[in-house]
Image: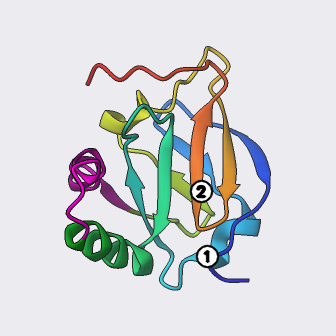
C-alpha cells in the first residue's frame, strides 16, 4: 500500500553515505524522491517523507499556529531532497549523517512509522551538534 510503512530493516551505510533502501518501502514515493528531515523536539535519526507528502506537511504546520510547531518547521527547512538511484541506493548527504547515530559497524535501521520512515543508527542517541 502506497504511503503506509511498517517493519524494520537493517542495512549498512557505506563510507560515502550510500545505503540500500528497503524494497518494501520503495513504492512509497510516486516519483522515487524523498525528503530527509533532521530530528526535532528531542527526536532521533532522520525522518524520510515521500516528496508528494512533504508539501502537505509544510502547509499543515504553517496553518497550525501552535508554538510547538516551531521546531518542526525549523527541521523541515533543513531537509534535503534525495532520490533512490537505479541500484536502489539512497545517498545520505554528509551534513545529515551525524543525525543518524552511526556506530563503528555503520549499521542502521529503516523503521516504518505508518506515514513516515525513520532512519536510525545502532549507537543510540545521534550527535546533534551540527
Q: Nearer the viewer, residue 41 or 2?
A: 41
The picture places residue 105, in percent across and down from the top left corner, at 68, 19
Tell me which segment is drawn in magenta: 64-81
Q: Residue at x 71, y 59 (%)?
A: 22
Q: Which mark is residue 28?
A: 1
- Report whether 116 appears left or right of 50: right
As for residue 115 lying within the magenta part, the answer is no
The picture places residue 114, in percent across and down from the top left corner, at 66, 65
Q: Residue at x 74, y 83 (%)?
A: 1
Query: Which type of secondary structure does the marked residue at label 2 adopt?
Result: strand
Which class describes the residues within 10 Å of circle 1: few (<14), some (14-19), or many (20+)? many
Residue 8 to residue 31: above or below:
above
Residue 25 to residue 11: above or below:
below
Which mark sits nearer the N-terminus, 2 or 1? 1
Image quadrant of residue 128?
A: top left
Q: Which residue is mark 2?
A: 117
Q: Residue at x 41, y 20 (%)?
A: 127
Amino acid at each position: 500500500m502506497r504511503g503506509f510503512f511498517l517493519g524494520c530493516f537493517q542495512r549498512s551505510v557505506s563510507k560515502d553515505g550510500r545505503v540500500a533502501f528497503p524494497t518494501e518501502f520503495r513504492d512509497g514515493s510516486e516519483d522515487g524522491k524523498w525528503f530527509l528531515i533532521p530530528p526535532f523536539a528531542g527526536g532521533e535519526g532522520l525522518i524520510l517523507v515521500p516528496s508528494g507528502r512533504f508539501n502537505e506537511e509544510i502547509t499543515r504546520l504553517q496553518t497550525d499556529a501552535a508554538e510547538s510547531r516551531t521546531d518542526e518547521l525549523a527541521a523541515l527547512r533543513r531537509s534535503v531532497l534525495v532520490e533512490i538511484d537505479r541500484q536502489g541506493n539512497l545517498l545520505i548527504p554528509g551534513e545529515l549523517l551525524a543525525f543518524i547515530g552511526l556506530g563503528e559497524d555503520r549499521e542502521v535501521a529503516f523503521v516504518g512509522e505508518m506515514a513516515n520512515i525513520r532512519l536510525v543508527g545502532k549507537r543510540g542517541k545521534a550527535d546533534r551538534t551540527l
